[in-house]
Amino acid sequence: MPSFLLIAHAVAGSIMLITGMVAMLSAKGRKYHRVSGISYAWSTAFVGLSGFIIAVQTSNQFLIATSVFVTYMMVTAYRSLYLKQLHKVVKAQAIDKLIICISVVAASYLLVLGGYGISKGNYAGTVPLVFGIICARFVAGDIRKFTKGPADKKHWLYNHIAGMVGSYIGGTTAFLAVNAQFFTNDFQVWIWLVPTVVGTPYIIYNIRKYKEGKRTLDRVALTKGNAE
């Protein structure tokens, strides 16, 4: 009989997948987006922590890695909402330093786990390796952001989009990993990488959309300024 933690994890996972999709499809800044986003953040936090506990109990290295990745991406995405003024005053608070330290450990763990698995001929290591590379890029970006300052004042929005969608990718990947046994008995790398392949272009598209919108507004403001 499934344990209470396992049942709660499954329920939270379902809420996470539903609210995450609603948040991505609803207009940014609107009520539906905010409410679904908050529900998604809390359910994702529970999924990540409970998944980590379950994975440790069952010695499932892949799910340990996925839980770490999901939690990290969600935390950085949520934290970005409180860093809107970072471009004015570049200063990392204690919570930011803690997140970066934990993130370095998480990225290292994912990279080592993935690299070791592939070196042993276990191609399942491809997934944590990909997650590790993504995590490492985020960590490097955070360190640069707090030392040199963000290059764009909309940095928080880009990080929020990437983090939220990234955590959704990780959660969906874990869902496929757990349920793939019902469709095939053989490990298929492509099944676990589908969320990354689909989600990454979505992240790039949305970030570029907001960047292009900003450039358009800047050009309009410059034109008006020259006219005056």
Image (tube, rainbow, N blue to C red):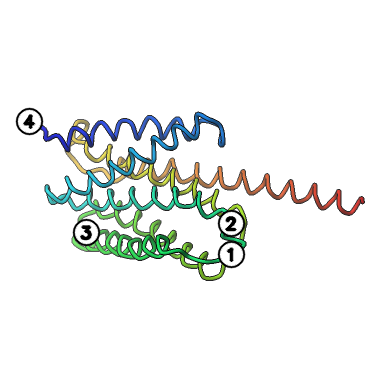
The foreground one among 227 and 114 is 227
State the residue at coordinates (50%, 52%).
82
Q: Is residue 143 above or below residue 225?
A: below
Judging by the rendered image, the residue that carries numbered circle 3 is 117
Q: Amino acid at mark 4?
A: Met
Q: Are marks 1 and 3 in contact (CB under 8 Å)?
A: no
Q: Give the image location of residue 211, x and y in percent.
A: 63, 49
Q: CA distance from mark 4 to mark 3?
A: 32 Å
Disc 1 to disc 3, C-alpha distance: 42 Å
Decide if residue 39 is on the left or right side of residue 219.
left
Mark 2: which amino acid? Gln
Q: Which mark is residue 1?
A: 4
Tag 2 near tag 1, CB within 8 Å: yes
Q: Which SS class for mark 2?
A: loop
Q: Nearer the viewer, mark 1 or mark 3?
A: 1
Q: Is residue 172 left or right of residue 51?
A: right
* Amino acid type, mark 3: Gly
The residue under label 1 is 89
Label 3: which secondary element: helix
